[in-house]
Each structure stands twice: as C-alpha cells, then as structure tokens.
Amino acid sequence: MTRLERYYNYIDGTWVGAETYRLIDDPATGEPYAEIADASTSDADAALQAARRCVDSCALSSVRPAQRVTWLLAIADEIRALTEEAAAVLSRENGKSLDVARGEFTEAARYFEYYAGMADKIEGVSIPLGDGYVDFTSYEPMGVSVQIVPWNFPPSICARSLAPALAAGNAVVVKSPEVSPLAMTFLMTACERAGLPKGAVNLLCGDGSLVGAHLVGRALTNQIVFTGSVATGQSILRAAAEHATPCVMEMGGKSAAIVHPDADIEQVLASVRSGIFFNSGQVCSAMSRLLVHRSRLAEVTRRVTELAESLSIGSGFENRYITPLVSKAQLAQVEGMCQRAMADGARCLTGGERVSGTAGYLMQPTVFVDVAVNSEIFQQEVFGPVLVIHPFDSEDEAVELANGTAFGLVAGVFDRQLDRALRTARRLRGGQVFINEWFAGGIETPFGGVGLSGFGREKGQEALYSYVQTRNIAIRISGE
Ligand code: NAD
C-alpha cells in the first residue's frame, strides 16, 4: 500500500509529528489521500508555552514596528510564492475549485499586506490633565492569542486573524479544523521562511472538543478568536468565563437580501450566483434568503431557478462552480435539511438532493419557495447551496422578515432607488449590509455579527484594535 502524504503540526518553530495521524478524505472521491499529525493536549500546552515565551521575550512587541512591517510583507510574498502548490492541496482536501482555492491564498497574502501597512501606525493619544501632568495611552498586545478556525476557508480565515494579531505584536496558537487542515500548514511555512521569531506562530490540528477545548480553557490564553458554529461558540464562551478571557466571536448567519420593485435583475442574479452558490454555499455570510417584492416574484423566481440549473457541477480540479461539499457529514446535513423543508411543506423548484452517480459529496444547487417563516429552512443556517425565496408586500414587512432570525451577520438590498435602499439598509440587523452587490466589501471593510452571529469585528482597520488592549500612563511631573 502506498504511504499517504503526511503533514505535521508546527510548534515553537519546529514541525512536530504525533502518535496518531488523522486521515483526510478527498471530497471528490470519498477516499483518504493524506494524513496529518493529530495534536494532543500536551502539544497544546507546548504551543501555549512557546507562544508565552515569545511574548515574555518581547521578540515581537519590543522591536521597532518597522520590523513587524518587514515580517508581514515577507509572509505575504512567501504566500504568493507558495500559492499554486498550496491551492492544489486546498482544492483536493476541501473539494473547492482551484480558482476559489487560489483566491483564498491571494486573500491571505492581502491580509498580511494590509496589516503590514498598519503595524507601524498603532498610535496612542496624549490626554491633557493640566499643568504638572503628562498622560498618554498606548496600545499593547493582548499576549497569547488562541485562534480557532473552521473548515470553509481555512487559510483565508486563519490569515484574517493571524495578520492583525502579529501586526500588533501578539504570539499566536492556531487550531485548524479537523476537516481540511492541510493547506493551512503553508501559512506556517510562509511565516517560517519570513524569519518570524520562534513561538510567534504555532499550528495544531486536533480534535475540537479535546485540543480546542483545552486551549480555550487555559489561563495562559490571553485572547480567543473563534470562527465556527453557534454551538461551539457557546461552549467556548462558557470556557472563557473561567479566566475572563476576552473573545472575538464570528459565528454563523442566515442572511437575507431584499429585492425592491426597482431592483436591477442582472445585479440580483449576479449576486445570487456568488451569494449562495459560491464555494457551494459553504459561506457564513451566504445569501441564504431572497426576499422579493411580490410585483417581481414570478420573474425573479424563474430567473434564479434557471441560474441554479445552469451552474456547472463537478470536482474542484475540473474548476466547476458547484463542487463537492467538504465532507460526507456536511452533505448529509444539507440533504437532511432539504428533506425536512419539503416535509414542512416547502416547494423545491430545483435540486433538493445530492448529485447521484458519484462517490463525491456533491449537492445540487437548490431553490425553495412556499416556505413557512417559522420553519427550520427559513430560520437556520444550511451551509450548502440552498436558497429560499420568499415574497413581501411592504418595506416594513421585508425588514421584519430579514431581521426575524436569531442571527445578524450580513444583509443586502437591491434597488435602483438609492434613497430607499439606504433607508432599508439602516434598518437591517447585521454587521455589514450590501447594496446592489452581495460581498461588495473586502478585507478593508469591518466584518462581524450581532446576536447569534457573534461579536467583535474582523477585517478593516477596526479589526486591528481587537488585538490590542489600551494602557494609560498618567505621570505627575512636578510637585506644584
Ligand atoms: P465548528 O464550530 O464545528 O468548528 C469550528 C472550529 O472549532 C474547529 O476548528 C473545531 O475543531 C473547533 N472546536 C470544536 N469544538 C470546540 C470546543 N469545544 N472548543 C474549542 N474549539 C472547538 O464549525 P465548522 O463546522 O468548522 O464551520 C462551520 C461554521 O462556521 C458555520 O456555522 C459557519 O457559519 C461558521 N463560520 C462563521 C464565519 C464568520 O466569520 N462569521 C466564517 C466561517 C464559518
């Protein structure tokens, strides 16, 4: 039997094996094709201690900030150099298309470039206290930042937190997801080649309920940055309470786009294509509900269904638009939700089940109508290529429907009348609202949720301040 390709954890500047190795499936075939060292709680402690030593030595925080700029830019360059190789691994382990995988590494490089630009501009303020005093604030690193990453965009979500954390002088322990952890190792290679101090970055692949839970419950952990599901997030928040560890929480969504009577249908269709079908719908900020003014319902429903039926389906290596979901479990979860939606009375216009005749984890692009507002498919995240279309008669009703879930990550409005679009946008619950283009933001725009979607912000200049704590120094300079 041929030996599977092996991947390792990265602790204190060294690639580390383990007693056991976790098999990684190829979602296009369902067959294992690689394995990765399965981290233990001792590995987690070793990583935390390495990060702590790095923090205590001030190797990142006491250098001239320009040195951190140099490191971050070098990491970005190394990521770009590794992109072709790393994207092939990501596509294979995750199912996603090569184009999407390449895009993730480009985005990862951009995070490092963007926060490199801020690493030497983390400036405090001077506060006047009258004669005889000097007072100023400084932004200090949090210390050891533990970052827990999900499987849908592992390298880019990892870079989203890693880059600002390093820019601000923190040391980081990253926990990769059990499914699709391989491509993240290339980010560590980039950090290693860029010459980051030992212990500044550490990467562990291990069981979430064991290694992840261990990391978030330790006193050595000074900050938790979590991206993942609501249930896991809630258990992390309970663990964080023990040491009052500050958290940034990025959880799921059930985001709605509102299509007003004057919406441009081509803008709507282009946004539906990427909004719910990009990465086969495995996107936290997916447009999973399309709320359409009744006057446009028939037209939009027909065109969206045609669009769903026109998308290319196949493996990531064939670079299709709809590619296999990440795992057998995810496929079962998505298909199960579709079956329950139909049992609840929803009408499936296209899709609704897996693609037959393949061992790959392929789900058909799916469109539902006649959905009850209190049903699971209208209220809960699917995390697959499944769209719900629902009518509204007034702006008030559209806002109520859009805001009527426990989530609040993003939302969207489509309307040629910008005054109405803006008015609607301001009423929507969520950290980011798109007008006339879903995903119109970028790494430069703050992103995060309210309600069960979480709290704290990633991306943009604002996110850097998630990775620092304010210190005030008040000096009495004369005895007068
Ligand atoms: P998940 O919650 O199952 O796992 C996420 C990570 O948490 C994994 O690394 C896992 O090992 C770890 N984990 C599991 N149990 C843990 C515990 N008790 N303590 C510490 N860590 C633990 O999520 P997933 O299935 O990997 O990802 C899909 C979910 O992530 C979806 O709900 C999606 O909406 C959400 N997501 C949110 C964003 C965002 O920015 N808001 C982005 C991507 C994904």
Image (cartoon, rainbow, N blue to C red):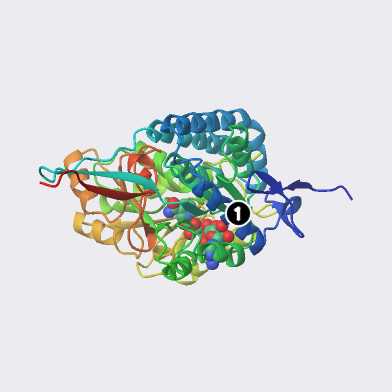
User: What residue is drawn where x is 44% and y is 66%?
Assistant: 240
Residue most toward the front? 479
**Seen in the image, is 404 located left or right of residue 336?**
left
- Residue 359 seen anywhere in this rendered image of the structure: no
**356 vs 43, nearest the viewer:** 43
* Crowd class of label 1 (few under 14; some 14 to 19; many from 20; radius 10 Å): many
Dot 1: element: helix
Residue 367: x and y in percent read 46, 54
Tag count: 1
Residue 261: x and y in percent read 24, 46
- Residue 45 seen anywhere in this rendered image of the structure: yes
Residue type marked 1 = Ala
**Seen in the image, is 95 located left or right of residue 228?**
right
Residue 379: x and y in percent read 39, 65
Residue 216: x and y in percent read 51, 63
Give the labeled residue for mark 1: 47
**191 vs 170, nearest the viewer:** 170
User: What residue is drawn where x is 32% and y is 43%?
Assistant: 462
**414 vs 296, nearest the viewer:** 414
User: What residue is drawn where x is 46% and y is 64%?
Assistant: 233
